[in-house]
Amino acid sequence: MHKIRSGSFIGFLALAILLAMHTGAMAENYKCKGSDGRIEYSDRPCDTSKESLSQPRAGAGVVAAPAIAPLKRLEALFADYDFRLCERERLASEIEVAQRSGELKTAEARWKLRQERLTFLNDTLIEFQEKAAKITKGALSDSVEMMAVRNFQRKLKTCGVIKK
């Protein structure tokens, strides 16, 4: 008969315990807060009646990034670009009026910096449109996100109105 050494048996047992603990740690964990304020942990996503407090863990202990609703991302984009795009609308209106009146030709040097700024702001508008398109990709034309984009664009048009 073979004699089993106690050192190797204990090592094997420790390895088996570590493997069992590791596979349990790889399972997804959810932390939810119920309407009564109690915090619960589960291997399933939170019910709709409960607030999700943490995102599920992906394999190897990496926490998945929370998905931000498209409307929230659009609102942040609007806030980020609002000032510059309003400036673009105002500047475009001023240059258009100056062009119609002939002032743009007679005082070309005076308008040069404004025209260069408008060119930069046109690039900013293109950048904004590309970012908004990525957020609204696949959204229906009557979706909340697309309506928000149209409302923002309408608001921008009022920025360019020159008051007499």
Image (cartoon, rainbow, N blue to C red):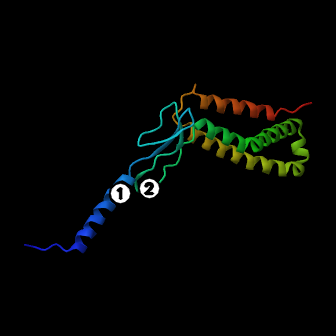
State the residue position of label 1.
21
Q: Amino acid at mark 1?
A: Met
Q: Residue furthest left?
A: 1
On the image, which quarter does residue 163 sit in? top right
Q: Secondary structure at mark 2?
A: helix
Tag shown at residue 61: 2
As displayed, is residue 160 above or below residue 84?
above
Residue at image coords 72%, 41%: 79
Quadrant in the picture for the N terminus: bottom left
Q: Residue at x 63, y 38 (%)?
A: 72
The spot of residue 129 in percent (x, y) is: 64, 41
**Mark 2 Cα shell of 10 Å, populated few (<14), some (14-19), many (≥20):** few
Q: Is residue 3 left or right of residue 128?
A: left
The mark total stands at 2
Residue flagged by tag 2: what amino acid is it? Gly
Q: Residue at x 88, y 52 (%)?
A: 109
Quadrant (top left/top right/bottom left/bottom right) for the C terminus: top right
Q: How many residues crowd around disc 1 within 10 Å: few (fewer than 14), some, or many (20 or more)?
A: few
Q: Report the front residue among 110 and 22.
A: 22
Give residue 152's position: percent from left, percent from top: 70, 33
Q: Nearer the viewer, residue 123 or 148?
A: 148
* Front-most of residues 24 and 79: 24
